[in-house]
Each structure stands twice: as structure tokens, then as C-alpha cells.
């Protein structure tokens, strides 16, 4: 593993342990050339996934990109980092188990929204606002009213 500080390719593993609910290995590494310490994660990848964008463009699946979008939706929400990591790993496992290497971006978005809805409603609405491209406050009103259709009846009574 190349040292991110000096570029030396001869780094040493100092500690390894399971991470993310035993679906990854966390390794603490040391660079003898510069003395730098850094962490790497090793995960099983069942197959190379390709995302089919709505415009037909194809790009390699990017786990860090998925993770960034989920963490943005969950920013300042009371959800433990371990739970977020478990959710992301679960989403990736689910995508890999679909049996297809080409996955429409819409499928990924729906799976992410389903996962977020189970752990935090605010994050779910945040993600949906970007995923569904909300343009005005009315878009939020409509989406939230669909979340609680019985709440509208309470207001009419």
C-alpha cells in the first residue's frame, strides 16, 4: 500500500481488526520512510458494478460517492456513525446481490431512500429533495404530505 504522505510503496500493517459489522477489515499502517500513520479499509467486492445514468451515460459504481451523499443527508442528525456504515454496506451488498452488473441510477436512489426512511425521516426528506430534484417549497409540502396522508385529515377535522 502506497503511503499517502511520501508515496513510499513499502508500508507496514501495525494493526488489523474487523470493521463495519464484519464486512470490512480496518488496517492501521505505518510508513518506515516518513513515519506517517494512516488507516485503510479492505472490503469484499463481489462484482464490478456499473451505474446507468438517466441520460444513458455509464460510469463505474463509486462507493465513496454513495457514502458522501448519504452522510450529507444525515449531517447533524442523531445517527451513530456505525449505523451509517452498516447501512452503506447493506446497500452495496443489496446492489451486488441483484445479479446484474449494470444498475440504473434510479434503482440505487430508491434503495437509498428506502434505507434512509427506516433510520431517519429528516435525512430521508433531505435525500429525496436532491434525488427527486425539488424546485420549490410546494415540492416539499407535497412530498411530506405523502409521508403522512392521515395528518391532512386531522387538519380538516
Image (tube, rainbow, N blue to C red):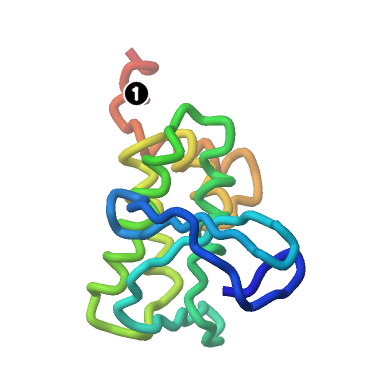
- Image position, residue 137 (x, y; %): 62, 39
Query: Number of marks in the image?
Result: 1
Q: Out of 137 and 2, give the one closest to the viewer.
A: 2
Q: Residue at x 42, y 44 (%)?
A: 84
- Image position, residue 128 (x, y; %): 49, 49
Q: Out of 13 and 44, give the one closest to the viewer.
A: 13
Q: Residue at x 35, y 65 (%)?
A: 92
Neighbours of disc 1 within 10 Å: few (<14), some (14-19), many (20+): few
Q: Out of 20 and 47, give the one closest to the viewer.
A: 20
Compared across the picture, whether 143 is left or right of 87 comes to: right
- Asked whether residue 7 appears in the rendered view, the answer is yes
Q: Residue at x 55, y 54 (%)?
A: 69
Q: Quadrant of the C terminus?
A: top left
Q: Residue at x 72, y 74 (%)?
A: 7
Task: Examine the rendered structure and indicate whether residue 4 appears above or below residue 70.
Answer: below
- Image position, residue 101 (x, y; %): 34, 85
Q: Quadrant of the N terminus?
A: bottom right
- Report which residue position mark 1 lands on: 151
Determine the secondary structure under disc 1. helix
Which residue, as the protein is rendered here, is positioned at the far top?
Answer: 157
- Image position, residue 140 (x, y; %): 54, 40
Compared across the picture, whether 51 is left or right of 34 comes to: left
Amino acid at each position: 500500500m502506497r503511503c499517502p504522505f511520501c508515496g513510499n510503496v513499502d508500508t507496514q500493517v501495525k494493526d488489523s481488526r474487523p470493521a463495519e459489522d464484519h464486512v470490512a477489515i480496518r488496517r492501521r499502517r505505518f510508513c518506515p520512510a516518513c513515519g506517517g500513520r494512516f488507516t485503510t479499509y479492505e472490503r469484499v467486492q463481489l462484482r464490478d458494478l456499473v451505474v446507468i445514468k438517466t441520460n444513458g451515460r455509464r460510469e463505474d459504481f463509486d462507493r465513496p460517492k454513495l457514502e458522501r451523499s448519504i452522510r450529507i443527508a444525515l449531517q447533524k442528525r442523531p445517527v451513530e456513525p456505525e449505523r451509517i456504515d452498516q447501512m452503506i454496506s447493506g446497500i452495496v451488498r443489496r446492489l451486488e446481490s441483484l445479479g446484474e452488473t449494470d444498475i440504473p441510477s434510479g434503482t440505487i436512489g430508491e434503495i437509498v431512500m428506502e434505507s434512509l426512511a427506516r433510520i431517519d425521516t429528516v435525512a430521508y426528506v433531505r435525500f429525496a429533495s436532491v434525488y427527486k430534484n425539488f424546485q420549490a417549497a410546494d415540492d416539499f409540502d407535497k412530498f411530506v404530505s405523502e409521508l403522512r396522508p392521515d395528518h391532512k385529515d386531522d387538519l380538516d377535522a
